[in-house]
Image (cartoon, helix red, strand yellow):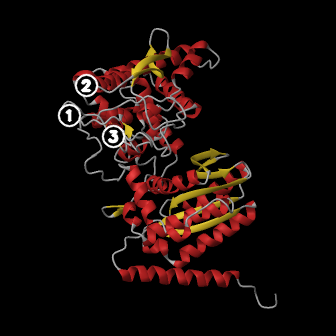
Amino acid sequence: MRFSDAFEIGPTNEDDWFDVTLDVDSNFCIDPFLIYQDDSGEWNTAHDHILSFFAMTFDCVRRAAGDKNSLPWRMAKNLMLFPEPAEFCLGVAATSPLGAGSGPGLQAEMLESISAALGHGLSNIPHMEYLAVLAGGIGYDRTSDMACNILKSYFIQYTQNVCRRHGIPMNKILVKHADWSDEHYYWIDKKVELPLNPTVTQQVLPILLTPEMFIKDIPVATAEKFWNYAQGASELRDRFNFDLARNAPRHLKARLARNNIGLVDSYFTSLEQERHNAYSLQDDPRRRLNPGETRTSLLVNFPGAAMPTAQEGIPQFVESLVTNFAYCIENKGIWRMLWYKSRGREEKMVQWLFYAMVVMFCRQNNVAVTPESDAGRGPVDFTFSQGWKDRALVELKLVRNTAFWDGITKQVPTYARAEEIHSAFFVGIAYTDDEMNSASQSMVQRASALASEKNGIAITPLIIDARRQSSASKQRMAASERAELRAVRKDDEAPESGE
């Protein structure tokens, strides 16, 4: 349900707000760089407001002088906690607007980055994303969380103006991080008038609106984009092998940035000299709008003969979800959602589509599904459970992902052991003929079998054919390849003579 539907209104010429979906997070972020380049009346001081916040935090870290038990350091730690601003219904939770937020992990990274900046003689930063670059990168939604928290007083005023213009009822409600004080160096929670989200029943949740001109799918400034920018710096080519480090780990990107502050400055200066556009909501090139309509499309295409139920146990239930997801992609045209122009979409899009399909069946069967779980030494995409004992996990990866094999041999086993889960499903998404050939699939089967035996868990692999389907002959070819793979599996499983 969209905001306009919930309150039965339509935008006028005075309105520029994003018509957000209220019952599920819209997979977008608020981009602070788009706020920086806007100089309209009510937002022309917003960027300075962000910089004032970080000047306050820099001052705390400077006064702490490295003493992490001091009062200034504790104040800085408190300022660097950014709970997910559920009022905006933005992010990647996909379940509901009630997400996890940005906790101690982000807090530590930002404080490290501030310390590094102070070490280079900086007393503040020109953009809040500067710290994300010095940290080697943080999640896009976390950057958005930070901006939403710091500027929440601006968004409160903006939403109130929209509601008054359209006669939308508002209630006085306590809002966390409604403002902050540069006199006392702390966050301020306070009661303000805002509309309430009618789709959230677990608690009373207000709604905050944002202008469309601040909406982005991928932020303008990121550590990954800085890494790409750095490849053009001749003074660095002898010290970094960029060709071999195309998918460099975060600590390497952080080291590059912290050792080359002048280059970071040049990067942001170059961004300031360009005009950056918000996400095209009209064209929706990445198909991130209308999550409810996407879910309906998936359910319509679901094979009715194999409706999943949880009566036989969670592993069997999850297996049916995974195999039906594959069926929809391969036989019901859902592969089209995984392509934009001539390239297969990113991993997050696949994960979001999977969640959009399975969540309704989980609710119907009283199965808890948790996206982006984290335990042990690495995250997995989804865990499913009915109580503690009956649980399973699903990891979805693009076959082209350089971490694909680590997912089978390390990531999934590590998480499963940490959480005492004994059933896992490793799902690969193949976009090319090479990724779908029988030899590659056979390797996946063998790697999963070895990882299962070594770790005492059952890892079930599945490679989904997400290639562009241009003709019936291509579908026959895929069927032939699958038949060949089944024959290979039978040969592998057949007992040797004399047994």
Give the numbered dot on residue 12.
1
Label 2, label 1: how far apart the Cα atoms are: 10 Å
Q: Position of residue 447 (x, y in %)?
A: 64, 68
> Which residue is drawn at the image coordinates 38% and 20% (left, top)?
153
Tell me the quarter of the image containing the C terminus: bottom right
- Counting residues from the start of the chain, the first of labels 3 and 1 encountered is 3
Foreground pick, 173 / 479? 173
- 221 w.r.t. 476: above or below: above
| Mark 3 in CB contact with mark 1 (< 8 angstroms) | no
- 270 w.r.t. 191: above or below: below
| Mark 2 in CB contact with mark 1 (< 8 angstroms) | yes
Residue placed under numbered mark 2 in the picture: 165
Is residue 460 at least partly visible in the picture? yes
Q: Is residue 269 left or right of residue 404?
A: left
Residue placed under numbered mark 3 in the picture: 5
Q: Position of residue 10 (x, y in %)?
A: 25, 37
Label 2, label 3: how far apart the Cα atoms are: 16 Å
User: Of helix, strand and loop, which one carries label 2?
Assistant: helix
- Counting residues from the start of the chain, the first of labels 2 and 3 encountered is 3
- 462 w.r.t. 202: above or below: below
Q: Amino acid at mark 3?
A: Asp
Q: Of all residues shown, which one is farthest toward the right?
A: 499
Q: Position of residue 108 (x, y in %)?
A: 57, 30
Q: Is residue 399 left or right of residue 167?
A: right
User: Of helix, strand and loop, which one carries label 1?
Assistant: loop
User: Of helix, strand and loop, which one carries label 3?
Assistant: helix
